[in-house]
Amino acid sequence: MKTDTLEALAVEVRSCHLCPLAKGRTNAVPGEGSGRSKIVLVGEAPGREEDLSGRPFVGRGGRVLRSALGSVGVASAQVYISNVVKCRPPKNRLPTRSEIDICRGAYLSREIELVDPDLVVLLGRTAARALLGVDSLGSVRGKVVKMKGRRYLSAYHPAAVLRNPGLKGAFRRDLRKIRNARAASNQT
């Protein structure tokens, strides 16, 4: 059953059994935030803490993300945040192409349509691949790409910053471009 509100879509996500990831999850993790947000952030998949809580970006990566957003003048309350897939892959492995295709079609594309943001920020290679079709984050990182009437900004995933603290400055520079992209959209 297709829905037309974020709340109804979240209920649908929580009861999803469209792919094998549902078998190993504690909780499916729908996106959350303001349905009127001009910015949607998209990560890869829920981690352990997200799986336990049923909420996106509440673990260490979420703390890195909120800190970086705050440092560039974007409050967490100003964004809608989600993931490409809504269930935690076993052992935090990368989601498969099939899992990505199922979740993107059933949920992520609909979330983005319902929020209708000015900018979609893709956190990491999996998100960039799922929504832009690129194989390399490096080919789009830090750039605003227009596709099918929507603007996308690709950045490192917060988990990459946790693994390599040397990426913190580049991550914040990428997120700083949210302000520039928002200003540009206000002029059009």
Image (cartoon, rainbow, N blue to C red):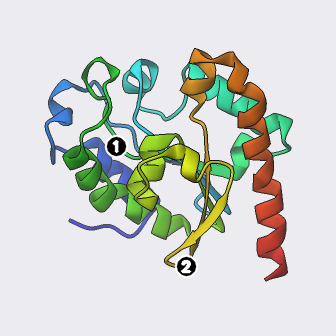
Q: Vertically, is 72 above or below 4?
A: above
The mark nearer the N terminus, 1 or 2, is: 1
Residue at image mark 2 = 149
Q: Vertically, is 18 above or below 47?
A: below
Q: Vertically, is 51 above or below 76?
A: above
Residue 46 image point, x, y percent: 41, 31
Asked if marks 1 and 2 touch (Cβ < 8 Å), the reply is no
Query: Would you identify the image quadrant in which residue 20 lies?
Result: top left
Q: Label 1 to label 2, Cα distance in Å? A: 23 Å
Residue drawn where x is 39% and y is 65% of the image:
110
Residue 26 image point, x, y percent: 28, 24
Q: Nearer the viewer, residue 143 or 26?
A: 143
The amino acid marked with disc number 2 is Gly
Residue 25 image point, x, y percent: 25, 27
SS assignment at label 1: loop
Query: Would you identify the image quadrant in which residue 115 lies?
Result: bottom right
Q: Quadrant of the C terminus?
A: bottom right
Res. 37 visible in picture:
no
Q: Nearer the viewer, residue 139 or 89?
A: 139
Residue drawn where x is 54% and y is 31% of the image:
57
Circle 1 or circle 2, nearest the eye: 2
Q: Quadrant of the N terminus?
A: bottom left
SS assignment at label 2: loop
The amino acid marked with disc number 1 is Val
Residue lying furthest bottom: 188
**Relative to residue 122, is residue 37 drawn left or right?**
right
Residue at image mark 1 = 85
Res. 96 visible in picture:
yes
Residue 187 image point, x, y percent: 84, 79
